[in-house]
């Protein structure tokens, strides 16, 4: 595997972050100086980093109950005694609904005195108990994901159509709930990650209704308000893309440009090309520009095999005029869009026509062309998710 990709994935490992920030003693959890006592902990871990996060605790706790909800086919094993549910991403399936019901049942009927809730990106789809009919809910989620809305807006809708999101799980708990978060959202609003199942929610039914109306989705009758205050809930950010970018600052001439990239993926690629094309930018070689975040892709009509990182790379190639620069676009979860790739790496000297690039972008089929160019990055599922990392290098 390429050295840059290896470094990004190593810096994204949630287990390393937990080892730095969390202590688990015989009957006490310590996070950032806060102490939580327990004798009968309930560990619930959900998201793309669920297995790695759960294993950290299951190896250290002598007595516990645990539920781990992970993506199907991630190839990771839970190293302990836990109820394991494999469910679907990016759209929920019947196993996602079963996971939501299982967690609600555990919180209302199991015997525990502290909930250790481990949350990471992907949880919104992997665990659900929808208020609308499941088939209507899934169709709405498909429309939302390709709409071009930001993840914070998508999750406003999710929170108000769900029995497990937007803080509702914490309202079911008879004990304190400590949520440890691996963030995959720009800005690291913890109530947005996984649609904030255990955190108070500041968004409203009216906001969700407005977003549904924008997309002509008729689900307003199912919207329910979320709790705005939770006295039994504590949350801590364990890891984010900011940590990854900071860990890469020893690269030649490194500058963190942004950890909150948003907007259309094609616009990001064109913007990065414009930076290296500008002769009097003030950047002195060698330099490395570091970015992280979640640009969007608005899909209209049929789409091929593509993803946001694929579109960033192709748009960069469409406009770059400096042959020796190199751009890495890496999804830290190992999956970009509907492809089997984590992303791509391209150089300004790549020989590909603008006609081919534009055709691929219009069809949202970036990976057919990137495969032909030998520019894809394949990691398989990584067991983490701190969003996308972009590394632009000029020798």
Image: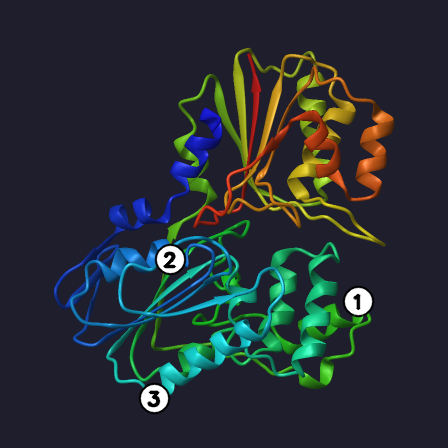
* Mark 3 vs mark 1: in front: 3
> Mark 1 sits on what residue?
215
Give residue 51's mark. 2
> Do callouts 2 and 3 mark residues in contact (Cβ within 8 Å)?
no
Establish if 116 lies above or below 107.
Answer: above
Going by the image, does 261 lie left or right of 365? Answer: left
Establish if 279 lies above or below 220.
Answer: above
At 65% from the left and 48% from the top, the residue drawn is 337
Establish if 218 lies above or below 389.
Answer: below
* Sequence-first tag of 2 and 1: 2
Establish if 50 lies above or below 104.
Answer: above
In terms of secondary structure, where does tag 2 sit?
Answer: helix
Position of the C terminus by quadrant: top right
Instruction: Indicate the position of residue 51 as horizontal and vertical percent values.
Output: 37, 57
Instruction: Indicate the position of residue 30 as horizontal and vertical percent values.
Output: 21, 59
Instruction: Indicate the position of residue 305 as horizontal and vertical percent values.
Output: 72, 45
> Do callouts 3 and 1 mark residues in contact (Cβ within 8 Å)?
no
In terms of secondary structure, where does tag 1 sit?
Answer: loop
Query: Does residue 37 show up?
Result: yes
* Sequence-first tag of 3 and 1: 3
> Mark 3 sits on what residue?
109
Going by the image, does 75 lie left or right of 351? Answer: left
* Mark 2 vs mark 1: in front: 2
- Measure the C-alpha gap from mark 3 to mark 1: 39 Å
Q: Quadrant of residue 212?
A: bottom right
Q: Nearer the viewer, residue 336 or 315?
A: 336
Classify mark 2: residues with Cα within 10 Å, few (<14), some (14-19) or many (20+). Answer: many
């Amino acid at each position: 595997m390429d050295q840059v990709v290896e470094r990004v994935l190593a810096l994204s490992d949630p287990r390393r972050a937990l080892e730095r920030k969390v202590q688990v003693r015989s009957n006490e959890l310590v996070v950032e100086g806060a102490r939580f006592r327990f004798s009968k902990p309930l560990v619930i871990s959900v998201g793309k980093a669920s297995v790695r996060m759960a294993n950290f605790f299951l190896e250290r706790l002598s007595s516990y109950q645990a539920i781990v909800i992970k993506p199907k086919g991630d190839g990771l094993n839970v190293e302990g005694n836990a109820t394991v549910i494999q469910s679907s991403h990016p759209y929920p399936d019947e196993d996602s609904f079963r996971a939501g019901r299982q967690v609600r049942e555990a919180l209302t009927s199991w015997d525990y005195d502290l909930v250790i809730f481990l949350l990471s990106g992907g949880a919104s789809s992997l665990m659900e108990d929808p208020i609308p009919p499941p088939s209507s809910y899934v169709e709405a989620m498909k429309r939302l994901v390709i709409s071009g809305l930001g993840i914070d807006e998508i999750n406003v809708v999710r929170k108000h159509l769900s029995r497990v999101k937007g803080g509702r799980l914490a309202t079911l708990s008879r004990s304190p709930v400590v949520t440890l978060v691996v963030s995959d959202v720009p800005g690291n609003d913890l109530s947005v990650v996984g649609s904030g199942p255990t955190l108070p929610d500041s968004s409203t039914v009216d906001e969700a209704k407005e977003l549904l109306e924008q997309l002509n989705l008729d689900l307003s009758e199912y919207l329910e308000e979320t709790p705005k205050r939770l006295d039994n809930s504590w949350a801590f950010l364990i890891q984010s893309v900011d940590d990854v970018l900071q860990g890469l600052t020893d690269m030649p001439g490194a500058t963190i440009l942004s950890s909150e990239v948003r907007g259309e993926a094609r616009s990001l690629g064109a913007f990065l090309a414009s930076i290296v094309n500008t002769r009097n930018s003030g950047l002195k070689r060698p330099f490395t520009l570091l970015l992280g975040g979640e640009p969007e892709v608005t899909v209209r009509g049929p789409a091929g095999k593509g993803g946001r990182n694929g579109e960033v790379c192709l748009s960069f190639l469409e406009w770059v005029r400096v042959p020796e620069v190199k751009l890495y676009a890496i999804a830290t979860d190992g999956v970009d869009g509907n492809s089997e790739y984590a992303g791509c790496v391209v150089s300004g000297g790549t020989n590909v026509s603008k006609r081919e690039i534009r055709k691929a972008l219009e069809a949202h089929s970036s990976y057919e062309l990137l495969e032909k160019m030998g520019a894809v990055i394949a990691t398989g599922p990584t067991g983490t998710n701190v969003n996308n990392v972009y590394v632009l290098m000029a020798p």
